[in-house]
Structures are given as structure tokens and as C-alpha cells.
Image (tube, rainbow, N blue to C red):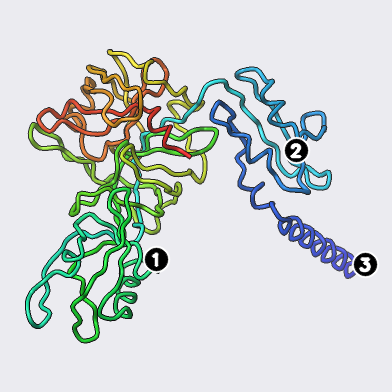
Amino acid sequence: MKKTLKILIKTAGALLCAMLFAVNAVPGMDTVAELPKHIYVDDAGGAEKLASLPEPFTVTDRDGVAVTSDLSERLGQAQNGEVKRFSIELFGVTVKNIDVHVRDDIYVMPCGSSVGISLWCNGVLVVGLGNVDDGQRRRCPAQEAGIRTGDSIIAVNGTAVEGINHLSTLTNSAGDSMELTVKRNNTQFVCTVYPCIKNGEAILGAWVRESTAGIGTLAFYTMSSMNFGALGHAVTDPDAGAIIDAKKGELVDATIVGVTHGEQGFPGEVRGTFSALSKKLGTVYANTRYGVFGTMHAQMPNELYPEGVKLAYPDEVELGPATLLTSLDDGSVTEYSCEIIKLFEQSASDGKGMVVKVTDERLLERTGGIVQGMSGSPILQNGKLIGAVTHVFINDPTRGYGIYAYWMYEQMR
């Protein structure tokens, strides 16, 4: 009897494992697994992933009626603030329940968390030029070809450059001349370079960099698309002074290790650290003059605003009291009082849209005001996200510039 029971248990276990394996092997199951339990639908969209699930998955309402084909229409008829429960079914079996929150306005999650940002260049960035000895005279082959500091070398003889080592491989195999595809600002051009050849190695006379990393602040993400914006200004190379043309990047969790107090003529700094083992928060897809942008891997709620806030349009921002969110110590986000003391009227995207003055004594005592590393700290007014801190005034650390949050939102895909 016991032997028979053991056989039955083993058989049932094997069947269960086979069923689980079969379910997980269904195309699209990974997409379903990644869907959050709460989806927010607003003017920015949000229901696309749920409405585009592949067969054999179906989306049903509370009554078990399939609504996959007319999901967007149903949500369009929903009232502002309404929450609708949908089920994702596979062969008639519910595999996941989703609560869809319908909102008329664009809702965002203000963050204020310190994050690490790693960017990999499109090609390699030229951070310096120098002369080399070709046996007859000292010269700089790259400079002779018209290459400048801040340019990106993106291809050698038509082959895309994947990094510094790859650049060396391509140039060494190209011979005594080569065509480099170079990107300067938003323009590409091709130039011919005659390198110095030493011991079989082609020397261009250019110092290059393939990646960079630093600390900043996550400003917000849209609750419908999960796209995020950080910093409020571009990541630039410290040597070249050029905006890094990023082909990819990562947003990771960072640990604050100290704060340097800001003084007149001396900007303070939030010092943080992160590593390859730090938690991955999102993927970066753009580095622009309005900030760093990408997509979050998962929702990152703010305990101060668990339901998120509305995104304000520039003409809704007014002079007067406001607050900013930032993280300085143990990773927790704190809200501090500030004041909008100047507004710049802008009808289109631009960087510096407002002047912010810190009025909270706690923040003034801790940092002296706005310090480096706080770029991206979200600014709220009248219950809406209006902007993000971007720069500190060197001669007055209590004040700084901010960008309208809506301009950052416009940069999101």
C-alpha cells in the first residue's frame, strides 16, 4: 500500500512539473509574468501591453467576458479614478489578475532617490588629442583629419566601433590610411586619417573613452509607461565637456556615503557609490540636454506619494511655496520646503525654466542648500509635479535652477 502511494505521489509530482514546464514554455508567458499587478492608464497611454498579449492568452472582465479586442474602448469609457479588474487567462484558466487604474490626467511617481547612472558611448568619445613621433616629425593624425575633442568615432572603414579594444583592432588592420565616421553634435562626417605606424600598431594621436558613470537623482517615472527621467540635464564628459552620445546605459541603486556642505563659491556634493552588484532599476535609452531617460524594470513607489501625482504643465507653475524631494542619508526620501522665486516663460522645451530657493532649515543645515548630486530632485507645488532641480548657483548654494517636468516628459518615448 505504501509503495503504491509513493508511486502515485511521484507520478502526480511529475505531471505537475510537466504542466508547469508546459505553461512556462508558452510564447508570451514571460511577458505576462513581467506585467505589474497594477497598471495605470492615462493620457500617456498604459494599456498597450495588456491589449497586445499574443494568443492563446485572453483578457477577460469580472464577468468572464473576453475583452482583449475592445479593451482600449472599454477603458476609454471608464470614469476618472475608476479601477477595473481584469484577468489574463490561458486555455480558460486564470494565470494573473490585473487592476487597471483609469485617470484623465498624466500621473507620475515623483522619486527623489539617489541613483547610479552608467552610460556606454555610441562608438568612442575623443577626450584629448596629442602629437606622436612618426620617425620624421611630431604630428597628430586625428587632428590633421579634422577630428576635435568631444567628437565620437563611430566607425572605421564602415565597421561600427564597439569600444576601445575594437577600435584598436580595426585601426591596426586598416593599413596606412583609413576612413573614420565621426559624429559631432548631431552631424556625421567621414574623414581620412593617415596614422603613425609603430611596431605594427596604428596610432591616431587621440585619447578616447567608451563609458562613464556617476551619481544623480531619479526625478520621476510615468505610472502608465514606466518611462523615467533623471538629472534634468545631460551627462557630459568631464574632460571633453561634450554631451555623451549614449547607445545604452543602466540605472542602478546607489548608496550615499557622505555629504559635503556647500558654501559661497564652493559647491557641495552628495557622495555616493554603486557597483556591478547594485540592484538594477532600469535601462537607459537616451542622454539629452534635458536629462537621462529610460524605462524602469519595476514600480518604485514613494511612501510620501503612494498614488503618484499629476504632471503639471508649465503654465500651471507659479511663484511661491513649493517642496522638493531628495535623499541624503539612509536612502529614504525626505520632503523639504522651498520657494519658486523666478519663472522663465517657455513655449517649447528648454533647460532652465525656474529659479528655486531652499527655505527648509533642515536642508540648509545639512547641505547648505542645493549641492551636486541633487540634480533631478523633483519639485512639487499644489499637489503636482512641476519640475526638477538641475544646477546650483555657485555664489549662493541656497538657490538653483530647475527644469519644467513637462519638458522632461516630452523626451520620453
**Label 2 sits on what residue type?**
Val
In this view, the mark in front (3 or 1): 1
Q: Residue at x 47, y 29 (%)?
A: 108
Q: Which residue is mark 2?
A: 59
Q: Residue at x 64, y 20 (%)?
A: 82
**Against 187, is 25 above or below?**
below
CB under 8 Å between discs 3 and 1: no
User: Could you tell me which secondary element the residue under label 2 belongs to?
Assistant: strand
* Nearer to us in this view, 283 or 299: 283
Q: Which of the marked residues, 3 or 1, is nearer the chain's N terminus?
A: 3
Asked whether, in this view, residue 229 is left or right of residue 77, the answer is left
* Nearer to us in this view, 320 or 122: 122
Q: Which of the marked residues, 2 or 1, is nearer the chain's N terminus?
A: 2
Asked whether, in this view, residue 257 is left or right of residue 332, the answer is left
Q: Which of the marked residues, 3 or 2, is nearer the chain's N terminus?
A: 3
Q: Classify residue 1 by image quadrant.
A: bottom right
Q: Give the image location of residue 332, x and y in percent.
A: 36, 36
Q: Which mark is residue 1?
A: 3
Q: Which mark is residue 411?
A: none
Q: Residue at x 58, y 30 (%)?
A: 40
